[in-house]
């Protein structure tokens, strides 16, 4: 199994959050939600001392394992927060009887799904896709250096016509793909124009760089790599699974939200998925096609790594003109 986090994060009592933050989002409307993650919803708030905008991710402790899972997410956030420009910042956490609140950076420019569907993206889609891909690859390389697998890189449901929800604990891969038309939150958000941030570490974990030892199914099914689909018979998965998910995101950005391996009805084209066979729009450049082909390489050992994608001529050239 993957490496484990062993210490407990001290959680402040809930009453303190009301002294430090204006969390009166209910007064502004219960639908004032800017996103959702592995366990809870994310809503805007204001830090009273600085008047800075923040977000509160509220996680309901529905079962006995929810708190340990949230504690692990907090520990991972503490490892990465403030250390990379393309990873969302974490500030602190508070706990009440049934809910844990995480205070996070407020990203006001929407999520990747919104950007894909925007007029500005349609006018300069491939160049913007390259810039975004470069930044996400940088975040994934940073996580890999820390032995962290994110396991849930995705743009959001608005960019996909048929999507599946987060996998349940005991579902098979077939079950996951048969549950259609659900809301799929985005884990790629924008704090500034063209500056993307990776968020939601609710599915993330530590892993051993030497072996592919992760066998538990976590994340969002339509972004699962072939090695995850081979479970429980396969030998597991690790860091390359995040690059496969990024490859799916790149394809969706290049092809107006389409998924490379899904039929019109929402079912997976299994043979194409396992062999890496897909089509792209005719106007996609050859350098973009090449980067995409390496990101969606079926064998994890042949799949491009984050630092290699950053050095690839397609995203690298776009960053040089920023």
Image: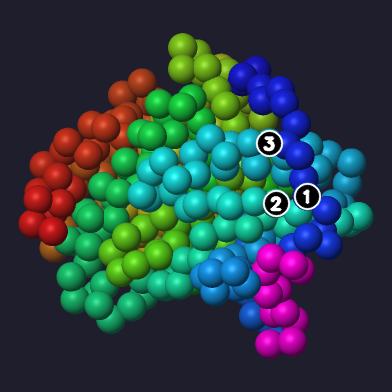
Per the image, the residue denoted by label 3 is 72
Mark 2 or 3: the one toward you: 2
- The quadrant of the image that shows the C terminus is bottom left
Res 64 seen here: yes
Crowding near the residue tagged with mark 2, few <14, some 14–19, many ≥20 C-alpha atoms within 10 Å: many
Check contact, mark 2 vs mark 3: CB within 8 A.
no
- The quadrant of the image that shows the N terminus is top right
From what the image shows, is residue 188 above or below residue 9? below
From what the image shows, is residue 264 above or below residue 204? below
User: Where residue 175 appears, x then y in whole percent?
Assistant: 69, 47
Earlier in the chain: of badge 2 and badge 3, it is 3
Crowding near the residue tagged with mark 1, few <14, some 14–19, many ≥20 C-alpha atoms within 10 Å: some
Decide which of 246, 285 is in the foreground and name it.
246
From what the image shows, is residue 275 above or below residue 153? above
Per the image, the residue denoted by label 1 is 12
Decide which of 262, 92 is in the foreground and name it.
92
Kindly state the secondary structure of the residue where label 1 is placed: strand
Image colouring: rainbow
Earlier in the chain: of badge 3 and badge 1, it is 1
Res 264 seen here: no
In three-dimensional space, the C-alpha distance between marks 3 and 1, rounded to whole angstroms, equals: 16 Å
In three-dimensional space, the C-alpha distance between marks 2 and 1, rounded to whole angstroms, equals: 6 Å
- Residue at 26% of width from left, 72% of height from top? 121
Decide which of 205, 125 is in the foreground and name it.
205
Check contact, mark 2 vs mark 1: CB within 8 A.
yes
User: Where residue 75 appears, x then y in whole percent?
Assistant: 63, 36
Mark 2 or 1: the one toward you: 1
Per the image, the residue denoted by label 2 is 93
* Quarter where residue 117 is shown: bottom left
Earlier in the chain: of badge 2 and badge 1, it is 1
């Amino acid at each position: 199994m993957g490496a484990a986090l062993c210490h407990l994060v001290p959680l402040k009592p809930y009453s303190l959050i009301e002294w430090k933050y204006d969390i009166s989002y209910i007064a502004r409307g219960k639908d004032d939600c800017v996103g959702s993650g592995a366990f809870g919803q994310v809503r805007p708030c204001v830090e009273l001392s600085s008047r800075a905008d923040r977000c509160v991710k509220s996680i309901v402790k529905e079962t006995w394992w929810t708190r340990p899972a949230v504690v692990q997410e907090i520990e991972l956030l503490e490892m990465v927060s403030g250390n990379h420009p393309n990873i969302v910042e974490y500030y602190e956490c508070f706990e009440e009887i049934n809910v844990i609140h995480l205070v996070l950076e407020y990203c006001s420019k929407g999520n990747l799904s919104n950007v894909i569907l925007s007029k500005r993206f349609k006018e300069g889609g491939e160049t913007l896709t390259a810039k975004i891909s470069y930044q996400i690859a940088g975040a994934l390389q940073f996580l890999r250096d820390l032995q962290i697998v994110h396991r849930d890189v995705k743009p959001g449901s608005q960019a996909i016509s048929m999507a599946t929800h987060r996998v349940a604990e005991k579902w098979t891969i077939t079950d996951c793909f048969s549950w259609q038309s659900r809301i799929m939150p985005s884990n790629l958000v924008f704090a500034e124009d063209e500056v993307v941030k990776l968020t939601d570490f609710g599915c993330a974990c530590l892993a051993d760089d030497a072996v592919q030892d992760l066998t538990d199914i976590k994340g969002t099914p339509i972004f699962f790599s072939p090695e995850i689909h081979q479970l429980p018979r396969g030998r597991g998965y690790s860091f390359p699974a995040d690059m496969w998910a990024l490859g799916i995101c790149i394809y969706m950005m290049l092809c107006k939200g389409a998924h490379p391996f899904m039929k019109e009805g929402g079912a997976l084209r299994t043979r194409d998925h396992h062999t890496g066979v897909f089509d792209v729009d005719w106007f996609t450049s050859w350098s973009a096609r090449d980067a995409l082909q390496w990101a969606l390489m079926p064998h994890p050992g042949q799949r491009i790594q984050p630092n290699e994608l950053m050095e690839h001529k397609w995203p690298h050239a776009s960053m040089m003109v920023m």
